[in-house]
Image (cartoon, helix red, strand yellow):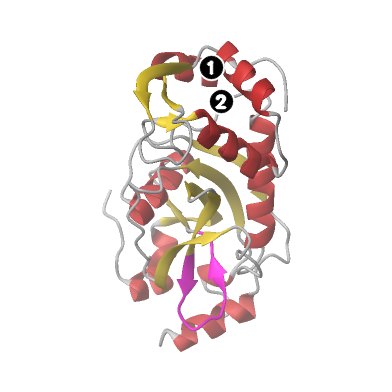
Amino acid sequence: MSVLTDPKKIALHGGKYFLPQLSVDCVILGFHDGELKVLLLKMHHSAHWALPGGFIYKEETVDDAAHRVLEERTGLKNLFLQQFHVFGNPARSSSKATVEYFKKEGIHLDKNSWLAQRFVTVGYYALVDFAKAQPHPDLFSDACEWVSLREAEDLFMDHSDILQKALETVRLQLNYQPIGFNLLPRKFTMPELQRLYETILGKPLDRRNFQRRMLAYGILKKLAEQKKGVAHKAPFLYSFDTQRYRKALAAGLDGGW
């Protein structure tokens, strides 16, 4: 499959290559300095930031399109990527706004253009290692950056709604699937893991109950090492048992938060 890299060809002739009126949008989440962050694009000719997304080639699956977008924006492959919702509000995009946007790009579209039609988008979320991701803008954006969830407001089109729905889904996932493998470094402390869960859930968790529960799942390995460079008693480091973690992703966990 040859990937189109010419913005003008995409705009004027993309209807020959892409599925009509269907797209994907990806909520890519990373954890850094005790904060959950989302990867956003700063669009050309716009004050708005947008979620990474793209069109679906006629010869690829919807899942493959989402994985392609994830790799193009982060440089990462074979990561946990989950479809979570379909967004199909008839008013989610504007034919007039699309024509005006491409006019600023120096590309003339008429109202019957494939790009000026109503689009339904399939939402995916990905949990990635902040340190390993290499953000890269797409053909229609000036920048691709990590943005704190506190600052991710007033996004392009309905992307704020897509982001909120993704966060709701991740919070629900915590009730029956593990989280952290792609968000934390290979070695981490129990307080760091708890901080991740508290950040996602938006509420504090009891330290003893959290530790007892996480250890009971059997997905963690306590290491002989302790965290260096801390002021007080150095906490032990942990890592995920990859095999048991993946089994828990497939089979689920008991209980909720």
Disc 2 crowd rating (10 Å Cα; few below 14, some 14-19, many 20+) is: some
Disc sitting over residue 63 in the figure: none
**Residue of label 1:** 248
Helix, strand or loop at disc 2?
loop
Q: Quadrant of residue 201?
A: top right
Quadrant location of the C terminus in the rendered image: top right
**Residue of label 2:** 178
Residue 232 sits above or below residue 73 on the image: above
Q: Which residues are magenta?
A: 41-51
Please provide percent x and percent y for residue 17.
Answer: 38, 57
Pick the residue in front: 125 or 231: 231
Q: Amino acid at mark 2?
A: Pro
Q: Residue at x 68, y 15 (%)?
A: 254
**Residue that sits furthest to the front in the current view:** 232
Residue 21 is one of the magenta-drawn residues: no
Do labels 2 and 1 touch, CB within 8 Å?
yes
Please provide percent x and percent y for residue 21.
Answer: 57, 58
Q: Quadrant of residue 170?
A: top right
